[in-house]
Amino acid sequence: MPSDDALSELDPIRAIAAEGDAWILPTVPTAHGGVYGAHQLFQQVLVAELATPGKRVLSLQTAFSSGGAGGQPMRAEVERLSEGRSFAFLRLRFTQGELVISETLVMTAADEPDFIRVELPPAAPLPVEDWADDRPLMFPGRNAVPEGAGLDRVERLLELPAAEADQGLARALIAMASEPPLMGALLAALPRLSPSTTGTGTTNVLTQSLAFLEPLPLGEGVVMRVDRRWAGGSRVHGTGEVLARDGRLLATFGTTGVMRPPRGA
């Protein structure tokens, strides 16, 4: 089980500094040289909620337009499209110099009492007690997976009690964890490549969308479920959801990316 010290793993990307109406964001060096898209999603949630006190991220749609340079700081510019008592609509632009790394449309909202509550299909408890611990995947707490998981659906239990009290941090963590699973599932489904192939090919997330519906009980754990929906023409698409252990829907997300083979494949 991870200790509260797991949150310290976030320090390299969590130290966001205000600079006038903008924010300066740290990045980490990466093997591919660019800025991790998953880290940007984490920071987009934090910046949007810093920019709209008293509101939380309800939805965001991100386009990753350039890879950028990992290890070099980014600048986050916030354009307020509309803002009222209940909702705010923002455009976030992450840049390095003149290069736009990503652009995001965000809606933040102040929570209100239920007028109507509907969830279809009805929630059913998820049997996660026997899931086995797995290597972390862009989430600093416990990661567990079911035995014999299929390739068309990826399921992962994410648990980090230290983050539950800070729901803004919890949303940022789930945004970060939502980006890698689709590409990982598709890569696992590929046949073994011939030894004559060269290079690593291209595997990138191009757009990511999320909607946060309910508080995230990371103390007891949430289940992230990702379905491979389509692949063709070197493009891929998948959808996902985040569920409480009792089956309640907490968040949804979608991923669209590019996947090209190595030369000679």
Image (cartoon, rainbow, N blue to C red):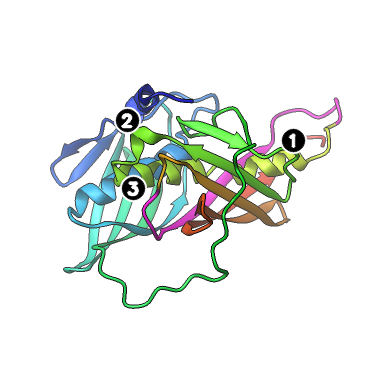
Q: Secondary structure at mark 3?
A: helix
Q: Is residue 222 magenta?
A: no
Residue at which label 2 appears: 26
Q: Name the residue nearer the viewer: 139 or 28.
A: 139
* Label 3 sits on residue: 45
Q: Nearer the viewer, residue 138 or 221?
A: 221
Quadrant into which the C terminus falls: top right
Give percent across and percent down for residue 217. 40, 46
The amino acid pointed to by label 1 is: Pro
The residue stretch that appears in magenta: 194-216
Where does residue 96 sit, x and y in percent of width and height? 34, 37
Q: Residue at x 70, y 44 (%)?
A: 186
Instruction: Give me the C-alpha separation between circle 3 and circle 2.
Output: 15 Å
Would you say 147 lies left or right of 64 here? right
Type of the residue with mark 3: Val
Please state the horizontal and vertical placement of residue 89, each as a whole percent of the image. 28, 64
The residues tagged by marks 1 and 2 sit, at their Cα atoms, a distance apart of 31 Å
Label 2 amino acid?
A: Pro
Instruction: Please determine whether, in this image, residue 140 is positioned above or below residue 79.
Output: above
| Residue denoted by label 1 | 262
Contact between labelled residues 2 and 1, with CB atoms less than 8 Å apart = no
